[in-house]
Image (cartoon, rainbow, N blue to C red):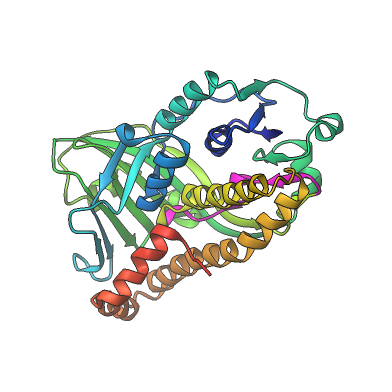
Amino acid sequence: MRVCIIGSGLSSLALAKALVNQNIYVDLVAQKKQNTPDKLRTIGISKSNVDFFNDQITNIERITWKLKKIEIFTENLKKEKILNFENYGDELFSIVKNFQLMEILEKILSKNIYFKKLNKKINSNLIKNYNLIINTDASNFISEKYFSKKIMKEYNSSAYTTKIVHEKIKNDSAIQIFTKKGPLAFLPMSDYETSIVYSIHKSIEKNENLKKLINYYNSKYKIKKIEKTISVELKSFNLRSYYYKNILAFGDLLHRIHPLAGQGFNMTIRDIKTLLDIIKNKYELGLPLDSSVNSEFEKKLKHNNFIFSNGIDLVHEFFNFERKTNNDILSKTVQLLGKYPGVNKVFKKIADNGILF
């Protein structure tokens, strides 16, 4: 059996490696030249997803920076933590440099006999050549024709990403601050590097200097250098239909969420888990990999992914409302709830495993 994956991003490479590990032949079709990965971009991966990645895709321990604590603040409560997540000795999640993970996957796949990277034109003839096609690329004609209907939310905001270089420090705690201008995250990458992600509303961003904002809200690091800044317009969406006949939408084509909780790639890893389970069951029963895989995938995940995405939106709107009203009652309520071990445990479980029904 040979599966076609369209796209050359991180989701495509991770899925390709997961499939070849099951002795499934994979043709990865990349129509356009892949841009050089930005070295500023990082991704957060939950502990359960790191374990899955190590076991079912490839071992990434050497490129992960483990975080043992997440501290959440709001500007209204100044320096009072409203939530504190900690695993007491074990990591909560890990930070990985995007370009390093892509380099590892590309190198391993290039040597795998089950894998081929092809530069083919994406057209109707390509579709006919495979029983199962997995499309992660939003820019091709397949996506425009079959996967254009979305449930979308515009945030009228941009996410700014940069990196600070600072004096060496024990750097295993992530900090999220819900400021009056938008959510700001400090995500450690090493003892001397920390990634910054700051989401700022468009009505504010033109008048703000990002470096000044970082210095204003930083209370932990002795900063030596602030790197260049990259930005992307924020929006979230879920596709209304996950597949068309033998073509399955996947990765960033399938769903995108607000970055405030660092859950985007975690959703994709959970999607890979589910897809692998479906494929393994097909193999064990001696059934072909065809469009039935797609319908099962949608049935298992569409509802969960939609609820999880809306949960992230709810968190964003919750703190956005507080920012607009300048009222700390909501923060104090969350702070009170977070002190109960059972509630804290539920929050951690959802962040680690997603929503399971």
Residue 221 is situated, as x and y percent measured from the top left of the image, at 17, 44
332 to 91, vertically: above or below? below
48 to 18, vertically: above or below? below
Residue 175 lies in what quarter of the image? bottom left
> Which span of residues is magenta-colored?
245-260
* In this rendering, position of residue 272 left or right of residue 208: right
Residue 125 is situated, as x and y percent measured from the top left of the image, at 86, 29
Is residue 239 a member of the stretch shown in magenta? no
Residue ID at (57%, 65%): 304
Asked if residue 313 shows in the view, the reply is yes
66 to 35, vertically: above or below? below
* In this rendering, position of residue 53 left or right of residue 130: left
- Classify the position of the N terminus by image quarter: top right
Residue 150 lies in what quarter of the image? bottom right
Viewer-side residue, 80 vs 71: 71
Asked if residue 208 shows in the view, the reply is no
Residue ID at (24%, 71%): 77
Residue ID at (55%, 47%): 272
3 to 151, vertically: above or below? above
Residue 106 is situated, as x and y percent measured from the top left of the image, at 51, 24
Is residue 253 a member of the stretch shown in magenta? yes
Residue 30 is situated, as x and y percent measured from the top left of the image, at 66, 26
Viewer-side residue, 145 vs 94: 94
* In this rendering, position of residue 229 left or right of residue 213: right
Viewer-side residue, 82 vs 29: 29
